[in-house]
Amino acid sequence: MTGRPAPADLLRDLAPRALGAVVRRYGHFADAEDAVQEALLAAATTWPADGTPDNALAWLIRVASRKMADQYRRDEARRRREDLAASWSLIPHEPVPAHDDTLILMLMCCHPSLSPGAAIPLTLRAVGGLTTREIAAAFLVPEATMAQRISRAKAKLKEAGEPFALPPPGEGGQRLRSVLHVLYLIFNEGYAASGGPDLARSDLSGEAIRLARDVHAALPQDPEATGLLALMLLTDARRPARTRPGGELVPLAEQDRARWDRRLITEGLTLLTGALRQGRPGEYQVQAAIAALHDQAASHAQTDWAQILALYDRLEQLTGNPMVTLNRAVATAMVHGPGAGLALLDGLGGRLGDHHRLRAVRAHLLEQAGDTSGAIAEFQAAAARTTNLRERDYLATKAARLATGPP
């Protein structure tokens, strides 16, 4: 029908609401999540042919509830739950819950007992609506491996006995930070994939933005939730210019800024301004402010590097993250020269090991300093250490061009 979202988009939007309704009504997160996934699969199969139901959310909840009932009836070890299972068959016209439990689901998926490696796939499946196969493909592991990882995460949640409710007072802040951290990691993996043939995974970064919008909608006065969404939008705005038609990487200094998405930049700036007005700057707001300075510069040469360096100084104080120090070295080189930037890299080897990004930044600064042979060696070393093929090709090409000299 005209004006209605495509079934795939609608399913992705409805997945967390359906799961929230089923978990809230019956408990048993793991069983409910499996049942909702089956309902989503059934919808993806039948809706394109039969048409989307008028009340699509109620359809998903009803089918998932019946799947749960069937599951318990088949399980001989749970025969005593027959009566309970029978009571879970919904009346076709039972009203759909008005509230949206997406935030509670995200908080559950980011339970303190779960590592980011477990919380990210669980969040993508339970809240993002991605299939196990899609998540496995995103993280370059076999589907069976990812299925085991998600199953273990659900088992840990079951052991934790987490009630389906917002965390008690005193725990909400830390749990929200965990949610924001997981969404930040999902976005970063989508924007700059750690491995594989493509520079980026727009499906992952897009999903992170959608979930960040959900968190912001639930907590519009939280400055860090707002700051994270602003950061994602201001960064994703540059995505159209990050690659050439063949998929080759285009560094920030060479990007055609006319191709940046001004709509996303405007939205991100508005969100960031509102967050900063609250006077509680956090790491995501500071990162968003750095992204905003890049987006507002008319050219790479006109970027306010002094202000960016000051913000990286602040961010390093907030986080102590060595990757922040790595980025601060680049800003330092832009303000005080490549020698000053290289000096900051000297102490990072013990914290970042032989990470390809450390090698790439050192190569870039050595090139600026006029040390061609040193830059070539570092670009080659960086290329050998990255598993992203687009990054590898870019770094290897840089080394080759420096070796052959100017045309």
Image (cartoon, grey):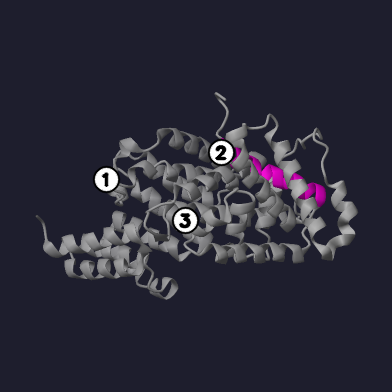
Please report whichever mark, 3 or 2, sits nearer to the chain's N-terminal start.
2
- Quarter where residue 153 is shown: bottom right
Question: From the viewer's perspective, is residue 93 above or below residue 339?
Answer: above
Closer to the camera, 254 or 362? 254
- Magenta segment: 7-26
Q: Is residue 19 magenta?
A: yes
Residue 381 visible to the viewer = yes
User: What residue is drawn where x is 12% and y is 62%?
Assistant: 404
How far across and how far down the image is residue 139, in percent?
49, 60
What is the residue that sits farthest to the left in this orientation? 407
Residue 283 visible to the viewer = no
Check disc 3 and report the residue beneath it: 189
Question: From the viewer's perspective, is residue 224 above or below residue 405?
Answer: above
Q: Amino acid at mark 3?
A: Glu
Question: From the viewer's perspective, is residue 65 above or below residue 30?
Answer: above
Please report whichever mark, 3 or 1, sits nearer to the chain's N-terminal start.
3
Tell me, for residue 301, which label it has, or none: 1
| 3D distance between C-alphas at marks 3 and 2 | 21 Å
Q: Amino acid at mark 1?
A: Ala
The rendered magenta stretch, by its main secondary structure, is classed as helix
The secondary structure type at the circle numbered 1 is loop
Q: Is residue 401 magenta?
A: no
Classify 10 Å Cα crowding around label 1: few (below 14), some (14-19), many (20 and above): few
Check disc 2 and report the residue beneath it: 9
| 3D distance between C-alphas at marks 2 and 1 | 40 Å
| Nearest to viewer (mark 2 / mark 1) | 2
| Nearest to viewer (mark 3 / mark 2) | 2
| 3D distance between C-alphas at marks 3 and 1 | 28 Å
